[in-house]
Image (tube, grey):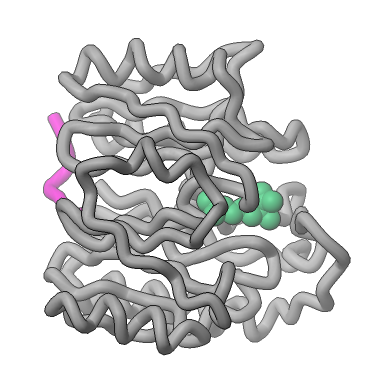
Amino acid sequence: MRAVSPVALIRPVPDSFPAALVREGRPALDVDLARSQHDRYRWHLEDAGYQVKQVPTDERHPDCVFIEDTAVVLGSSAVITRPGAPQRRGEVEPVASALAALGLAVRRVADPGTIDGGDVMMIGQSLYVGESQRTNRAGIEQLAAFALEEGLTVVPISVHDALHLKSVVLPIDAETVVVTPEAVEEEALEGLRVLYEAEQERHRFSALPLVDGRVLVTANAPETADRVRSIGCDVVPIDVSQIQAADGGLTCMSILL
Ligand code: CIR
């Protein structure tokens, strides 16, 4: 049996967070600020109506706050990923236990497959999966087989200029995405309404649609947020500068059931 939804799984920021993986350079990450931003994120989840459950943090894994990468929930099952960065593979077990305790059937991506949850975007019955630095073809094929069992179809999409698909393609509602221009194979998004991230805000916009209909958006991309507002969305800005400095966005800090 499944827990009463909606549930949001999160994982606190560890003291080791300044050692998080980053694509370029080594930003000076402020753990206290990251924690207060994460607390605010949690507050927004609760305010929207989620029952927030916490998986304990793990000092051995500086990136464990990015819990989205460790599992993909597909209806009544959860696919535990095999993260593309070997240093992150030890993050998955506590998340698998938490999802099993919520009543989900647990499936696993196996070697040689790799998947990061940040590469998986569900819209309706379609599961768009980014082929990226972290997610490979073998991983996508394994996920596609699990998805089929749940009546979902996988649409692979190449990611060129980003860590993950959802770094640059953000679902807003059942038919709309915000896309960073020239970052992914946009043809794969045919049939969806595409809004573009404003040029001067490239790689700053992130969004998380909440169960109450509002959409959490990053505070440092106001022009793009206005574009989302212009289609009638109630957007709620949040400052997550420290999460963004570690290559994260708004989807990455939770698994929503
Ligand atoms: C990493 O490189 O894996 C982390 N520093 C950032 C992961 C962000 N995950 C996500 O957006 N789903």
Relative to 16, 132 lies left or right: left
Residue 199 coordinates in the image, percent (x, y)? 53, 76
Q: In which quarter of the image is the N terminus?
A: top left
Residue depicted at x 46% and y 28%: 80
Please check the rendered image and state whether residue 56 is part of the magenta-colored stretch, yes or no. no
Residue depicted at x 29% and y 20%: 147
Res 41 → quadrant = bottom left
Outermost residue, right direction? 25
Relative to 197, 216 lies left or right: left
Q: Nearer the viewer, residue 49 or 211?
A: 211
Relative to 116, 9 lies left or right: left
**Magenta-drawn stretch, dominant element (helix, strand or loop):** loop
Q: Can residue 85 be seen in this view?
A: yes
Residue 34 coordinates in the image, percent (x, y)? 62, 78
- Image height check: is 80 above or below 25? above
Res 47 → quadrant = bottom left
- Highlighted range, magenta: 1-6
Residue depicted at x 31% and y 78%: 44
Residue depicted at x 83% and y 77%: 28
Residue 124 coordinates in the image, percent (x, y)? 16, 40
- Image height check: is 117 above or below 111? below
Please check the rendered image and state whether residue 5 is part of the magenta-colored stretch, yes or no. yes
Number of marks: 0
- Image height check: is 47 above or below 72? below
Q: Nearer the viewer, residue 79 or 122?
A: 122
